[in-house]
Amino acid sequence: MPDPRTPGTTMTPSDVVQRQLNAYNAHDLDAFVDCFSDDVRLFRMPAETPGTIGKQALRAFYAKHRFSIPALRAELLSRIAAGDKVVDHERIHGLGEAPVEMLAVYRVSDGVIADVWFFAV
């Protein structure tokens, strides 16, 4: 799929997800939010409805509850990509005394992340 941010280049869904992971670890809110669609939906499973809808809600949540934590970082343990889906097994540091493991399933559409499903491990 073409990269809308860099004409003439192509990004795979894995590239898009890696770009957001890099921005997450850099605490670069603008670059992070830029990786998502305007109407992105984030689910914390087993929820049937999204807990976060839209880029502005995403920005507000991550500014207040994630990027305000200096020690926050995600360690990628493994990644599987198939079609428009990317599944990351991540270890999140900085949210508590011990790291938290998560599975994040990303659906990429038109060069941005459209949906994310988070599963606690």
Image (cartoon, grey):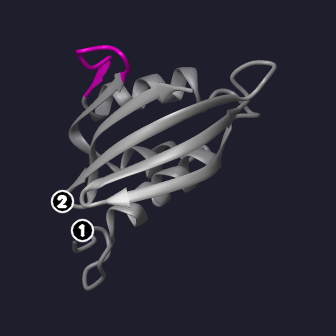
Q: Residue at x 29, y 35 (%)?
A: 55
Using the image, determine if residue 117 lies above or below residue 107.
Answer: above
The residue furthest right is 97
Q: Residue at x 22, y 72 (%)?
A: 1
Q: Which of labels 1 and 2 is toward the front? A: 2
The overriding secondary structure of the stretch rendered in magenta is: loop
Q: Residues within 10 Å of mark 1 (few under 14, many from 20)?
A: few
Q: Residue at x 31, y 14 (%)?
A: 47
Relative placement, left or right, of 11 versus 84 is: right
Determine the secondary structure under disc 1: loop
Residue 54, quarter of the rendered image: top left
Is label 1 in contact with label 2 (beta carbons under 8 Å)? Answer: yes
- The location of residue 41, given as percent across then percent down, is 26, 30
Determine the secondary structure under disc 2: loop
Give the amino acid at mark 1.
Pro
The answer to which of 101 and 24 lies nearer the viewer is 101
Q: Provide the residue span drawn in magenta.
A: 44-53
Residue labelled with disc 2: 110
Location of the C terminus (image quadrant)? top right
The numbered mark at residue 4 is 1
Using the image, determine if residue 29 lies above or below residue 85.
Answer: above
The answer to which of 53 and 119 lies nearer the viewer is 119
Q: Residue at x 25, y 61 (%)?
A: 83
Of labels 1 and 2, earlier in sequence is 1
- The location of residue 74, given as percent across then percent down, is 64, 42
- The location of residue 89, given as percent across then percent down, is 55, 43
The residue furthest bottom is 8
The numbered mark at residue 65 is none
Give the amino acid at mark 2.
Asp
